[in-house]
Amino acid sequence: MARPISRPASIWHTRLALLFLIPGIVFFLFFNLYPIFYAINMSFTNTSGYNIIGEINYTGIANYKELLTGLGSRFFYVVVRTLLFMAVSVPLKVVAGLAFALLLNSELLKGKGLWRGLAIVPWAVPAFFSILIWRGMFAAGEMGTINQLLKMINLRGVNWLFDTTNTFIAYNIVEVWLAYPFMMTMILAAMQSIPPDLYESSSMDGAGTWAKFRHITLPLIKKPLLFATTLTSIASFTMFQIAFLMNQGGPARTNELVMVHGYREAFHSAGLRYAYAASFQVLVSFMIIILIILSLKASRLTKEE
Amino acid sequence: MKIAGPQRAVFSLVITILTVLVLIAVVFPVFWIITTAIRPFPTISVPKFELIPKNATLEGFRWVLFESSFFLWLKNSLIVSAITVTLTLFLTILGAYSFSRFRFWGKESFLYGYFIASQFVGAFGITALIALYAFLARLGVINSLIILALIYTSGGIPFNTWLLKTYFDTLPKDFDEAALMDGASFLKVIYYVFLPIARPALAVVALFSFMGSWSEFILAQTLLGPENYTLPVGLWGLVGRWETPWNHFAAMAILFALPIVVFFIIAQRYLVAGLAQGGIKG
Amino acid sequence: MATIRLENLYKKFGDVHAVKNVNLEIRDKELLILLGPSGCGKTTTLRMIAGLEVPSEGKIYLDGEDITYTHPKDRKVSLVFQSYALYPHMTASQNISFPLMMKRTPRRKMEEQVKKVAVLLKIDHLLRRRPKELSGGERQRVALGRAIVKEPKIFLMDEPLSNVDAKLRVYLRAEIKKLQKELGITTIYVTHDQVEAMTIADRIGVMDRGELKQVSTPEDLYNNPQNLFVASFIGSPPMNLINGRVVEDSGRFFFDEGAFRVEIPPKLQKICPPLIGEEVVLGIRAEDVVLNGDGEINSALVSVEPLGYETLLILKAGRSVIRAITRGLMPLIEEEVQLSFKKEGIFLFDKKTEKRCV
């Protein structure tokens, strides 16, 4: 029997659409957005590992005050250290990604498929696992593989993970190793979408290798390159795994990046001060949001060109 | 100007050799872990550099299989991953179908929101973790594999929905309409027509959610107690501050990472396609 | 018994009027074809009858019952898609039985019915194959089978032959016609191919820019086009349409192109008085253009298109291009040719309303 459906604009325009979407959205928001608000609320309390199942009191802006003006606060040190990490690692990642992409896209290269496969190995191995491998290779003295290799070319071994500056260098090496496949893949995809006749016609016009790169390749990969750079910048700023797994932001907490600091304040400090860590994370989250807005603006600017 | 003849062959050789050298350096850590797994003693290596270890042995693997808690951790990992994959598929299929087929108010904004979320959700991970920990501790449900799987699922929803939606968009709408005419409801359209046709894309989503949950470490390490350790947490436990039994670690790490690497190779081109799409749309 | 009635049907997509005020009655057991160029609204009309689109205004009745907002699955209507939309993961037999499965038909009965349909369509030897392993014509039959097995009251077909090659198309359209008559199912069939429409339709509805221009039998559309669009769309080569004015000269009415004059035939003389001085369009089919030495129109031959048995001449007279079909006479290019129009082949259309003057 024909059953009328209520005034639809079309069968494709249906309340069912929301019904299908809502479980996913609710699920996502509950575990990802709600905790952010929970953290904001918590940052105004004295929640810690000792009163977590007991009574919690609101303490106003005490946590923030301590964070920004307290004697023991390392807020500014950690933020500056993180910005430094960003400033060093991002250009390295971009240059490495670009270099790999150019190399693997070169028409002079034989056996591209195999080399491209090998080049993304760092991406294929779970980061957690490869960072620990690097930790092993960076071991001190004559036991560390990297030091052994240095010795083979007559260089002195380095005390990698027990020295502030050396640790910072090690973080950058690992970060570049982990992240260049992403940059390279984005750039390669963009390069491969450039029609080859552009290069051929510029050859006819007498353009050399550098001129081709400067006037054809670079302008045409600019947009995806910029997009990948913004993503990788945010990844650098929020880097957790490398610092945490290599030596937990050491030695003596001198290499704590923001995420590691927040984590350790919450779970590795004597006070287990969740609320204090939350207030730190709230401030960091604001910075991340500003970064995201800036990066979206940047990628939109290039789009309008 | 094109380089021609013998000069070209020389350049080609130089570039190829350069590539090979760079890639040897890149792949070296993986090579290192494999050789470490077959070293006869637990120290990281002998004081002198050895490319292939002397007296190679499978002792590391024997220890993992017979003396460690490998199978307990494996079981926990499998439970978490199974729940994550199943739930992810269920939620993303419905969402992606909705985005791909229906017209509704606010669709573009929702989609944009999902896209942004899929790119940036990771940046707030630690903030969310601290809050989730406090929140779950108050509820007394911290040490739970199911809760962990729910968190994993939620984080991947935007990316996986987006991925599936772009695949659904390539399937002709005639299929849905034919099935609707034939008396199917939307749920039946999805079940009988879409799922079988979209199997490759579903496999990719399943792989991604599996890989994500299989190798996640921070949440698991923070939330779980020893009886619920997953493989990464168990592995982490082997790493000591001063001394690490690297041959045991390496053997277990290989067993743990092998499925991921294989899956990654299978799913790689979809990941790249998804990223490239994101690059264009963003 | 199955009739469809469309009443003041409108469909808007945003600002675009895809279908404008369509009124149409499809009779029982009839094969009605909606014909028109792409974008004319014929497929949208079909989809509204199928229930895949909801009209912006107007009503659809099936056997007098209002089905405007009824869900497609409750309409007892089958649709054959242009792409066939065969499910690629199912065999031919599973494809055909899909509608029955959705109705939870018992397995035994399902197999029986699939078999019956397959025999009817002569595809019983293909039932185990997947769409990929079938030829275009075979896929077409499986799609028909899936439509028939539901035992629908109405058959809808959306350009069902546009994906098969020209030779097969001629064969299949005869088959479809035969099948439709055998089953006696009221059918609405959409196509842009007028030959297809002319050869199989009981009646044709010609559509243009969302409007239904004329509904009639193929012969009647050809012989009595009611407006300029139908005149220009039906027939190959299309009807010659010549712009000019009506003038009066000593009590008789003439069509004046500027360069030449044609006397308006007697049966149209009586409608001429109000048209004097008005812009009109004279329509004449190529086969009604006569090439003869004493014709009243001077023209020059521009080009020649041999059609095989006949030859199409393209001529220029004044500002107008005139096509003529000839079998014997074969003038040379740029040669002057005298023409005349057969009186009974002349149509007059109002230039402003585009309607035929009668």
Image (tube, helix red, strand yellow):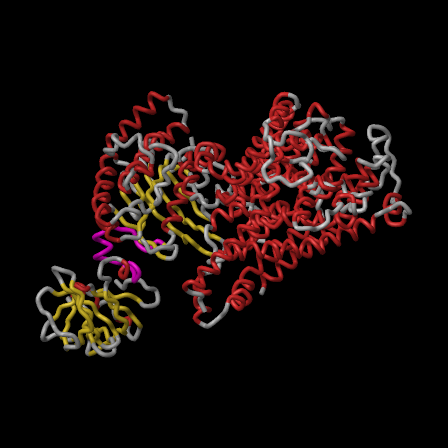
Residue C54, percent across and down?
46, 44
Residue C197, percent across and down?
26, 50
Q: Is residue A266 magenta?
A: no
Q: Name above or below for residue C195 compared with residue C267.
A: above
Q: Name above or below for residue B154 compared with residue A165.
A: above
Q: Is residue A104 left or right of residue C308?
A: right
Residue C107, percent across and down?
36, 22
Q: Answer with the quarter of the image where residue B36 lies.
A: top right
In this rendered view, identify the residue nearer to me: B242 or C80. B242
At a point 41% along the width and 63% down the height, the residue shown is B5
Determine if residue A184 is in view.
yes
In this rendered view, identify the residue nearer to me: A18 or A81. A81
In this rendered view, identify the residue nearer to me: C153 or B105. B105
Figure quadrant of the N terminus of chain B: bottom left
At a point 28% along the width and 40% down the height, the residue shown is C135
Determine if residue B106 is in view.
no
At a point 81% along the width and 46% down the height, the residue shown is A254
Q: Is residue C221 magenta?
A: yes
Q: Name above or below for residue B112 compared with residue B86.
A: below
Residue lying furthest right in this view? A71
- The span shown in magenta is C212-230
At a point 66% along the width and 31% down the height, the residue shown is B249
Q: Is residue A15 left or right of residue C37?
A: right
Q: How many marks?
A: 0
Q: Is residue C190 left or right of residue C202?
A: right
Residue C186, percent across and down?
29, 39
Q: Is residue A170 left or right of residue A71?
A: left
Q: Answer with the quarter of the image where residue B83 lies.
A: top right
